[in-house]
């Protein structure tokens, strides 16, 4: 264990985490240079394009230090978005240390701090790194002062790097060896290993990623997951070096993987503890939480003959995504589809993008909703997340909605703006405290329904990107809900209905009608859009008919030109859905939730 170091790199987005990780991998020569693809850790296309890490990947770096000894440096990558904060916490729980990366020209930013606090919560040894020192705008002295004054870290420890130019890479590896503590733990105690991730391999099934805290694990062992007592026979254990490298045994302090005939990743849970059936440990690792979807939306194919492809796509995605849940759903307006549950909006968007891109589908998603707990007059309690299942209001005794505890960290000059944003969202300010001279942590209790759509974007915009946001689900609390329906030419479109707080219903109805007016293109006849609560119309707009004939200006002469124009129109139509007589574009279904 003396020769193991387990650590993460934490940083604000774009400060160079992936680039530095790549350099560390290159420096220890586990991948031939000619095979080296930049940003090897972020393997999914979407991650690469959006530049965010969603699925963490781990790599074991074999490093011979200046002291002549060889070390196993386990770099545990963490996802970088609030939807995945539980996964981040499990990855950090598997580390003893972290490098906190700060951009030399930007200095510490919101996420730098939020990540630092997370690392401190896990008692990690934190080493500051100033990256991008090659930039002409780099201000190393200013950032060094910030590290001391604002972050409270030792400025003597600062490592200077340019991940881009490969400067300071060895200093990072040496610091891991010299300043990060080796893992503690007892290889002779019963097995106790923490799962921090898993992924699906089409040939081997689920690959479980874990850190061993005590004991040993090897092929042939029968292991047991402590959350559900499921048992499996271990086929293989090993370490990650971009590819999997099998090992005879993994023991206390090691980070690696296990293959054990586990069919889908849903059979494993991040944060669960692995032990041996024959000799179990007495207590699981602390902090286990089942990851539950909190945002629900229905997905429909634009073309109904793509339903089967959608089913196949979801099934495949599910193999690798234990947080995604889905079941069959149908709508009068949209036909057959699936009701899906997600960890948050980013998760929803990632699933949508992957389905559209990898399975070539064109999809409609209905307005996301949280789950509501409804008590009926006869005492029956139902949980619903789909407005179409909302019971007749006269049968409802009480409705309750989920609340969250939000922790928002901002420079204090944004305090007023954040306060306004949260109060506007029915939030209650519970507490605030200064973390440093000019940074505040503000605690709010908010209805989850008010944050699922665009809260994070709004927070970023009112704080010019400096606000960080993290949340925990609290409990269900009593609320006053109504179902807001949208009628198009007098017809109720079930897929556009939403459940909203009574105080907001009229305003929401008005906004939704305005948004739909913007989204739905003019058609040959007048379209009336109405918002209704029960039989009462609360808002209305109309779209006046479309008069111009697009082909008229082609004079009937040039037939190819005419055809091109029609083709172009057809493409534009691909993402439209006929609802009754009216064509509604894909984007309209989500637009009804927009608040401005
Ligand atoms: P996320 O994965 O989104 O968290 O971003 P990241 O922190 O991994 O940042 P990434 O490594 O993708 O780097 C962001 C940008 O900064 C890229 O364009 C890099 O090429 C650039 N970059 C990274 N390190 C350096 C550096 O040392 N110098 C300069 N000039 N640019 C760098």
Image (cartoon, rainbow, N blue to C red):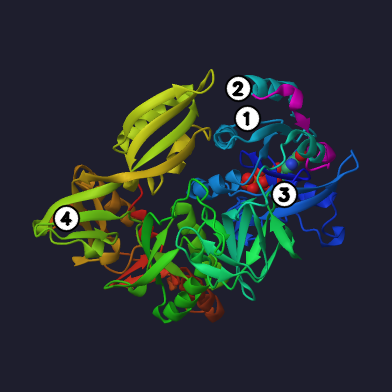
Give whichever of discs 1 and 3 has the lower sequence position.
3
The answer to the question of whether label 2 and label 4 lie on touching residues, with beta carbons closer than 8 A, is: no
Instruction: Say which of 163 and 73 sits in front.
Output: 73
Disc nearest the viewer among 1 and 4: 4
Q: Is residue 201 above or below residue 504?
A: below
The answer to the question of whether label 2 and label 1 lie on touching residues, with beta carbons closer than 8 A, is: yes
Give whichever of discs 4 and 3 has the lower sequence position.
3
Distance from Cα at disc 1 to Cα at disc 4? 48 Å
Element carrying mark 2 = loop
Distance from Cα at disc 4 to Cα at disc 3? 50 Å
Q: Residues within 10 Å of mark 4 (few under 14, many from 20)?
A: some
* Residue, disc 4: 375
Q: Residues within 10 Å of mark 2 (few under 14, many from 20)?
A: some
Q: What x and y, as percent, mark residue 187? A: 68, 51
* Residue, disc 3: 74
Q: Quadrant of the C terminus?
A: top left
Element carrying mark 1 = loop
* Residue, disc 2: 150
């Amino acid at each position: 264990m003396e020769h193991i170091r387990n650590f993460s790199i934490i940083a604000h987005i774009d400060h160079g985490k992936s680039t530095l990780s790549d350099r560390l991998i290159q420096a220890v020569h586990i991948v031939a240079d000619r095979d080296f693809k930049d940003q090897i850790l972020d393997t999914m296309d979407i991650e690469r394009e959006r530049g965010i890490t969603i699925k963490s990947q781990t790599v074991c770096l074999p490093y011979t230090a200046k002291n002549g000894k060889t070390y196993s440096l386990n770099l545990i990558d963490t996802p970088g978005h609030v939807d995945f904060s539980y996964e981040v916490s499990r990855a950090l729980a598997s580390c003893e240390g972290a490098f906190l990366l700060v951009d030399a020209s930007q200095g510490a930013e919101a996420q730098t701090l939020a990540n630092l606090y997370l690392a401190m919560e896990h008692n990690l040894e934190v080493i500051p790194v100033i990256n991008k020192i090659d930039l002409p705008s780099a201000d190393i002295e200013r950032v060094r002062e910030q590290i001391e004054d604002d972050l409270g870290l030792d400025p003597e420890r600062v490592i200077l790097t340019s991940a881009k130019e490969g400067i300071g890479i060895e200093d990072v590896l040496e610091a891991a060896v010299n300043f990060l503590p080796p893992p503690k733990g007892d290889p002779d105690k019963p097995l106790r290993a923490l799962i921090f991730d898993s992924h699906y391999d089409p040939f081997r099934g689920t690959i479980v990623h874990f850190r061993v805290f005590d004991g040993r694990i090897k092929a042939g062992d029968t292991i047991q997951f402590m959350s559900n007592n499921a048992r499996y026979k271990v086929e293989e254990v090993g370490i990650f070096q971009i590819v999997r490298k099998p090992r005879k045994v993994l023991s206390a302090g090691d980070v690696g993987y296990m293959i054990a005939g586990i069919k889908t990743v849903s059979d494993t849970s991040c944060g669960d503890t692995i032990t041996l059936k024959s000799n179990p440990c007495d207590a699981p690792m602390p902090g286990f939480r089942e990851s539950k979807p909190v945002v629900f939306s229905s997905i429909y194919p634009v073309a109904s003959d793509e339903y089967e492809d959608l089913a196949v796509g979801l099934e495949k995605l599910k193999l690798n995504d234990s947080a995604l849940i889905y079941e069959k759903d149908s709508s009068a307006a949209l036909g057959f589809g699936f009701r899906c549950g997600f960890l948050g909006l980013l998760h929803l968007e990632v699933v949508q993008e992957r389905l559209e891109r990898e399975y070539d589908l064109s999809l409609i998603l209905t307005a996301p909703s949280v789950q509501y707990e409804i008590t009926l007059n006869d005492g029956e309690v139902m949980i619903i997340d789909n407005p179409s299942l909302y019971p007749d209001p006269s049968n409802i005794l009480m409705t309750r909605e989920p609340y969250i505890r939000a922790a928002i960290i901002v420079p204090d000059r944004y305090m007023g703006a954040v306060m306004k944003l949260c109060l506007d969202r029915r939030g209650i300010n519970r507490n605030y405290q200064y973390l440093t001279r000019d940074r505040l942590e503000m605690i709010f209790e908010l209805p989850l329904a008010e944050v699922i759509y665009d809260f994070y974007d709004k927070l970023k915009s009112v704080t010019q990107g400096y606000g960080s946001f993290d949340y925990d689900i609290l409990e269900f609390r009593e609320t006053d809900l109504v179902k807001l329906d949208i009628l198009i030419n007098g017809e109720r479109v079930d897929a556009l209905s939403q459940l909203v707080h009574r105080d907001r219903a009229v305003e929401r109805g008005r906004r939704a009608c305005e948004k739909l007016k913007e989204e739905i293109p003019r058609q040959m006849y007048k379209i009336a859009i109405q918002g209704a609560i029960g039989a009462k119309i609360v808002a209305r707009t109309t779209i006046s008919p479309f008069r111009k004939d697009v082909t008229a200006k082609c004079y009937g002469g040039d037939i190819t030109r005419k055809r091109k124009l029609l083709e172009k129109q057809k493409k534009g139509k691909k993402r439209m859905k006929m609802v009754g007589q009216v064509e509604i574009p894909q984007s309209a279904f989500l637009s009804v939730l927009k608040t401005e």
